[in-house]
Amino acid sequence: MDGFRDIRLCILGFGHVTQRFCELVRDREGVLAREHGVRFLVNAVGTGSHGSWLDVEGATPAQVIAAFRAEGDRFISPERSGFDLIAASGADVLVESTPLALGGQLAIAHVDAAFDAGLDVVTVNKGPIAWDYRRLRDRADAEGLRLRHEGVTMDGCPVYNLAEFCLPGDRVLGFRGVLNSTSNYVLDAMAEGASRESAVADAIEGGFAETDPTYDLEGHDAAAKVAALANVLLDADITPDVIARDSIAELSQDDVAKVVAYGRRLRLIGEAQRNEDGEVTARVTLEPVRSQDPMYWISGTSSCLILETELAGTVEIVERDGLLTQTAYAVYADLLTIARSR
């Protein structure tokens, strides 16, 4: 493919999102070549318990996903640490998609290791953006590297890209939104008479809730997304640990029924605001909302974010029924942004 640029990837974490990303690239190889002049190759893949892949020459995502599935959803080679794979891969970009741990430390260390090796970074792991964004951003800027992170908040819905590319010269003053699909689905199901336990079980079976959904139900995921948004859009430099958050883990059917009886719906809402002195306050609260509130109409696995800006006024972003493909698209879009900037 003479005349095309190869972008070589080291992928850490090979769950549903990055597997779907490989399928997207496989299905759009012609579009990428014809319209963008780019070919994505995979030099390394690390998993927690499903082996690893290393090929310094690079293979197409189609070849990698085929090799993984041919062995029963695992790679032939044994697991290797992400740090070893970053160093050995010869890649151009790290795709960080490992499971999120509170504090985000492993993912943060992976990003630093990638920068040490001169790699750009795309992360769908919220940890680096929610816990250490300012330092990592400043390091990337100082070293001429790129840190992209569209997939950490609303699947593939353009939030950070919208603020960066579509609001030039403007400033975000605050935001408010429904950001966690699992809790939103559970609240809606309970409003229709389901028990919390059965609603959670349905969310797990539907594939959009983790087998252990505690992180979602207790508001940790929403707090991490609020911190990420506040850090990037409001330059807040906060972590999820300082954000007050409500939980729906102990919510009863009676609690929900009382709210429904008054014609309202319960929503777990994340918000942050920049005060006149520049201080940013953030929280995650369980609120009964009226039908006049846009959050009232955000049902099931949909999400909504309302930005209050200094010049453009109120900007509302809605993603309807966001699931796996949208998050995989965020990786795809971030990589194309990096490819254009090279």
Image (cartoon, rainbow, N blue to C red):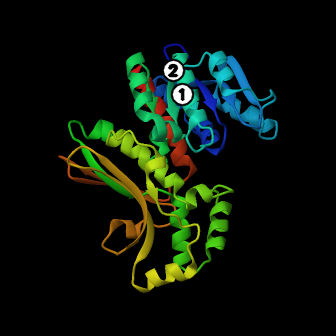
Which picture quadrant has residue 211? bottom right
Marks 1 and 2 in Cβ contact (< 8 Å)? yes
| Count of numbered circles in the view | 2
Q: Position of residue 11 (x, y in %)?
A: 62, 30
Q: Residues within 10 Å of mark 1 (few under 14, many from 20)?
A: many
Residue type at mark 1: give it. Val
Q: Of 74 and 101, which appears nearest the observer? A: 101
Q: Of 264 and 38, which appears nearest the observer? A: 264
Query: Secondary structure beneath disc 2?
Result: helix
State the mark number for residue 55. Answer: none
Q: Position of residue 205 (x, y in %)?
A: 68, 62
Residue 119 seen in the current view: no
State the mark number for residue 111. Answer: 1
Q: Relative to residue 97, is residue 298 depicted above or below?
A: below
State the mark number for residue 115. Answer: 2
**Which image quadrant: the C terminus?**
top left
Query: Secondary structure beneath disc 1?
Result: helix
Q: Residues within 10 Å of mark 2 (few under 14, many from 20)?
A: many
Residue 223 seen in the current view: yes
- Residue in the image at 39% along x and 85% along y: 262
Residue type at mark 2: give it. Phe
Q: Relative to residue 101, is residue 213 depicted above or below?
A: below
Which picture quadrant has residue 77? top right
Would residue 172 appear left or right of 241 to someone viewing this image? left
Q: Relative to residue 60, is residue 209 depicted above or below?
A: below
Would residue 166 appear left or right of 297 to someone viewing this image? left
What is the CA distance from the residue labelled 1 to the residue labelled 2? 6 Å
- Residue in the image at 31% along x and 41% along y: 163
